[in-house]
């Protein structure tokens, strides 16, 4: 029911409108009535009201003045004015106050039903929009850390970023950094020894939570943004809020890293290795930074190979290409391919060819997981023999761009189902493997997607996060196993993918509001009751 107040200085008319009209049938409830607009204003200042039915002429505050107050204060209240015939033209002036309708005295029930029926539909629509906005805001807040990480990953691996796009995303994603001030890329490794902390922090989500807590912005003068380029490669972007020279920032950062390493060692008996990889005068320098890929000669084959870290960074670029294909962004695609080939500038042509063939093979593998028709559509566009015969890097770049654009056009025809298919396949994989040590990063990698991008897709199509969905799968199976009465708690923990039974205990209690033992006792008691009832029936 929507709340309605009635305002009229003639008591007989006011009470008649309150009592003789079947407001409930129209979806309204009269919550109060007043003889003057002044009282109505005092009431709506402390009470929620959706609609007001008011006379136009009253002693102190008229219906028009009441409508003006609601309009000026931007209150979400629908106003309907009652006027006599002589006052009708005067009432029409209230259009500037967004008055919904004017009812002439004596009022006609059909007109009242029509007016308030329309108002009810408008209120219902407004409520639905508000619920949708609240839901979108909630989803955005849940995805915000992942979206922030995706922004920094794209920046670090060479996505397309103008100054304006960085400013826009900074505001949209509520990130606290100054584009003009120094920043750094820090390489971080967490070494977990064989002690009591190993099992807990070997859980991928626990390790991520630990890193996020270590680099939480506690000093208020430096902001840290952890990004996971792969399961074993962590980078942290550090930005300074103070206006200081780059040399002073670098020294200050080294001091903070030392403090963090010592804190982690003392509190958790974990060794954290940090190295400031590179420092930039500002964010734009970071965005425009081009890496020179490092190579080595593999002893057993005598072939030139990329060092592991550069190969992982290159894979992130390939994943960005996959996301660009999903989004159909030709401009972003051009920039990414240009950046990749710039980093290839010192590599021999045979290795560049092989890296590009590897990229298309990775894309092919990803599309094969999506479905046979997608795989065929992709491979129809790739001529591996032609790629193998190109001996000029510029020519190779042009051919790769052309192939990728053809792939985008082919995929766009199937775009409506592509993202949905990815998530459906991922869910099937999770249901079959939730008892193993799977993570968001691992599942995303199966479909050659950045974890942040995959996380966003997963939330969009399922309405829940990857972690919450995985927990639900594991906890529902744990409940089933415990109800059988055949397994001990630690056995159930292992069967649903938790190696640490204490951690399983906490997750189970948080999910069910009961400990595993309490849940077992509850089921045992239910079984006893069922047996008693069965015995009574048999007797």
Image: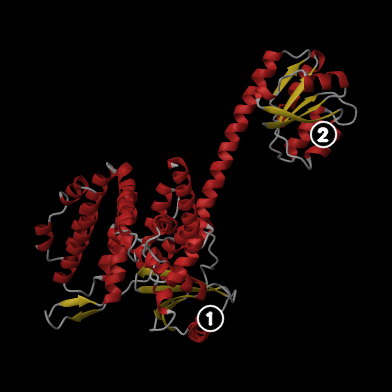
User: Percent position (x, y) of residue 310?
Assistant: 29, 74
81 lies left or right of 490: right
Residue 26 got which mark? none
Q: Nearer the viewer, residue 160 or 9?
A: 9
User: Percent position (x, y) of residue 334?
Assistant: 30, 57
Against 91, residue 369 (above or below) is below
Residue 40 got which mark? 2
Q: Residue at x 14, y 83 (%)?
A: 299
Alpha-carbon span between mark 2 and mark 1:
61 Å
Q: Residue at x 16, y 71 (%)?
A: 351
Q: Residue 293: in sight, yes or no?
A: no
In the picture, the quarter occupied by the N terminus is top right
Residue topped by disc 1: 245
Q: Nearer the viewer, mark 2 or mark 1?
A: 2
User: Percent position (x, y) of residue 144?
Assistant: 49, 58
**Quadrant in the rendering for residue 301:** bottom left
């Amino acid at each position: 029911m929507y709340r309605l107040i009635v305002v009229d200085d003639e008591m007989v008319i006011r009470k008649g409108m309150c009592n003789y009209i079947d407001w409930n049938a129209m979806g309204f409830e009269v919550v109060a009535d007043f003889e003057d607009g002044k009282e109505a204003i005092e009431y709506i200042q402390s009470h929620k009201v959706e609609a007001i039915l008011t006379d136009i002429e009253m002693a102190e505050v008229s219906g028009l003045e009441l409508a003006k107050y609601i309009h000026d204060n931007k209150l979400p209240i629908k106003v309907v004015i009652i006027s006599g015939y002589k006052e009708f033209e005067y009432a029409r002036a209230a259009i500037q106050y967004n008055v919904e309708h004017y009812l002439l005295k004596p009022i006609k029930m059909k007109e009242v039903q029509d007016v308030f029926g329309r108002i009810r539909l408008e209120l219902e629509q407004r409520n639905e929009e508000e619920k949708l906005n609240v839901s979108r805001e909630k989803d955005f807040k849940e995805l915000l850390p992942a979206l922030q990480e995706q922004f920094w990953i794209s920046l670090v691996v060479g996505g397309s970023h103008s100054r304006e796009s960085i400013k826009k995303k900074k505001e949209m994603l509520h990130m606290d950094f100054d584009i003009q001030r120094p920043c750094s890329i820090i390489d971080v490794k967490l070494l977990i020894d064989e002690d009591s902390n190993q099992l807990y922090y070997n859980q991928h989500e626990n390790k991520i939570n630990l890193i996020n807590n270590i680099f939480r912005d506690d000093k208020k003068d430096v902001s840290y943004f952890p990004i996971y380029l792969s399961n074993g490669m962590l980078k942290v972007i550090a930005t300074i809020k103070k206006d200081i020279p780059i040399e002073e920032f670098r020294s200050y950062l080294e001091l903070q890293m030392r403090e963090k390493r010592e804190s982690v060692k003392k509190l958790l008996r974990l060794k954290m290795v940090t190295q400031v990889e590179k420092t930039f005068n500002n964010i734009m320098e970071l965005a425009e930074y081009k890496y020179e890929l490092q190579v080595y000669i593999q002893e057993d084959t005598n072939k030139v190979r990329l060092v592991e870290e550069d190969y992982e960074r290159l894979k992130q670029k390939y994943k960005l290409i996959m996301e660009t294909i999903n989004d159909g962004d030709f401009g972003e695609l051009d920039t990414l391919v240009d950046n990749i080939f710039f980093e290839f500038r010192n590599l021999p042509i045979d290795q560049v060819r092989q890296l590009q063939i590897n990229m298309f093979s990775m894309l092919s593998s990803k599309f094969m997981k999506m479905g046979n028709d997608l795989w065929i559509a992709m491979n129809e566009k790739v001529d591996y023999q032609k790629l193998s015969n190109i001996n000029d890097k510029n020519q190779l770049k042009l051919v790769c761009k052309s192939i990728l654009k053809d792939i985008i056009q082919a995929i766009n025809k199937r775009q409506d189902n592509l993202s949905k298919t990815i998530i459906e396949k991922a869910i099937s994989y999770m249901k079959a493997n939730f008892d193993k040590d799977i993570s968001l990063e691992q599942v995303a990698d199966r479909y050659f997607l950045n974890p942040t991008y995959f996380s966003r897709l997963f939330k969009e199509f399922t309405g829940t996060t990857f972690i919450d969905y995985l927990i639900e799968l594991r906890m529902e199976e744990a409940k089933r196993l415990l109800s059988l009465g055949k397994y001990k708690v630690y056995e159930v923990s292992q069967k649903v993918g938790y190696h640490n039974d204490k951690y399983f205990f906490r997750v189970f209690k948080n999910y069910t509001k009961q400990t595993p033992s309490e849940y077992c006792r509850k089921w045992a008691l239910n079984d006893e009751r069922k047996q008693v009832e069965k015995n009574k029936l048999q007797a």
